[in-house]
Amino acid sequence: MRNLDLTTLQLFVAVCDARSIARAAVQQAIVGSAISKRMAALEHNVGTPLLVRRRRGVEPTPAGETLLEHARTMLACSDQIERDMAAYAAGVRGQVRILATASAIAESLADDVAAFLQMPAHLDIRIDIEERVSSGVLRGVREGIASVGICWDVADRSGLQSRPWRSDHLAVIVPAEHPLALHTSLAFAQTLAFEHVSLPPNSAVQLTLQRAAAMAGQPLNNRISVATFEAALRVVRARLAICVLPAELAQPGARDASLVVIPLTDDWAQRRFAICTRDDATLSPAARLLLDHLANCGRTRKPAPD
């Protein structure tokens, strides 16, 4: 299969997303007949229909869905190549892309990366960090979107190399005058009688809490949904609900004595994170230096609270 050019693949993705050649033409600032010609040539090139033409638009065939997935990956890789080469042209001699969960970024990753970049030998290295959920981190590393991924170690890391990083401990965060505030530790089931703040539904913390509530045979009563840990703490400080967050994140925000951080006693509350790569041996020198630094940070990590 030859002559698969990126422009045609970009137009194919646009058509599939818009479910219409006409709408894709408007979005891409190109006449519809030009897109139709490229789509016909693409189908001829691959030897199978890729789009089903309907009265109100188009939709991809099963073969089209497969090509769509590959096209997205190829276009993402092309974008990365452009960014990486632009970085080298600007004088950056090494660039590493990291995918990490929100917990990893908020707790220690930023500090670990900052310490790495402050070393004189690393002044010409650039590091890009992108937040994703654990499944997105692992998928991105497998697809070559990033050299390094950091996620919860219970995620499916099959096919990847990994090593331990840091750990954290989930805790319930309540206002100082809340009925639960007198406890020094709690089982998660003890919190289910109260209204919670929920995090994004696909986040590791929220998925864990939903499973734990189901195992306890009780509903998880979510009063307010927020997107970030900081927003969750603000809701608790306003006495609107309680929340479950990593204690390491919540403790700095509780220093004004308006909040109480109570560790959970459930086994799943102790979380460990892993650093993942496709193959350590194929990493660039900059990525290998960063990997060794992060692994060393994990070995010297502070113990999680009891």
Image: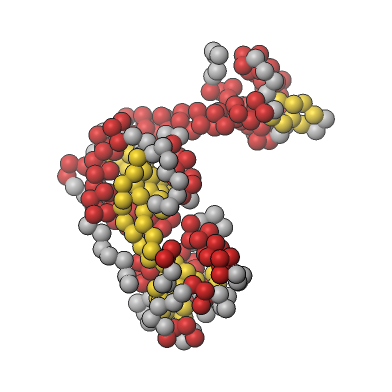
Q: Nearer the viewer, residue 283 or 23?
A: 283
Residue under the point 53% across and 65% down? 212
Q: Nearer the viewer, residue 80 or 184?
A: 184
User: Residue 193 at x, y = what percent?
Assistant: 57, 78
Q: Quadrant of residue 223?
A: bottom right
Q: Is residue 53 left or right of residue 267?
A: right
User: Residue 78 at x, y = what percent?
Assistant: 46, 28
Residue under the point 30% across and 36% down? 280
Residue under the point 27% across and 65% down? 303
Q: Is residue 58 left or right of residue 99?
A: right
Q: Is residue 39 above or below residue 169?
A: above
Q: Residue furthest right?
A: 55
Q: Is residue 31 left or right of residue 108?
A: right
Residue under the point 17% across and 44% down? 120
Q: Residue furthest left?
A: 120
Q: Is residue 167 above or below residue 244?
A: above
Q: Is residue 15 above or below residue 165?
A: above
Q: Quadrant of the C terminus?
A: bottom left
Res. 179 visible in picture: yes
User: Residue 23 at x, y = what percent?
Assistant: 71, 33
User: Residue 133 at x, y = what percent?
Assistant: 48, 50
Res. 250 visible in picture: no
The mark total stands at: 0
Q: Which colouring convention does the figure follow?
A: secondary structure
Q: Nearer the viewer, residue 219 or 197?
A: 219
Q: Quadrant of residue 1?
A: top right
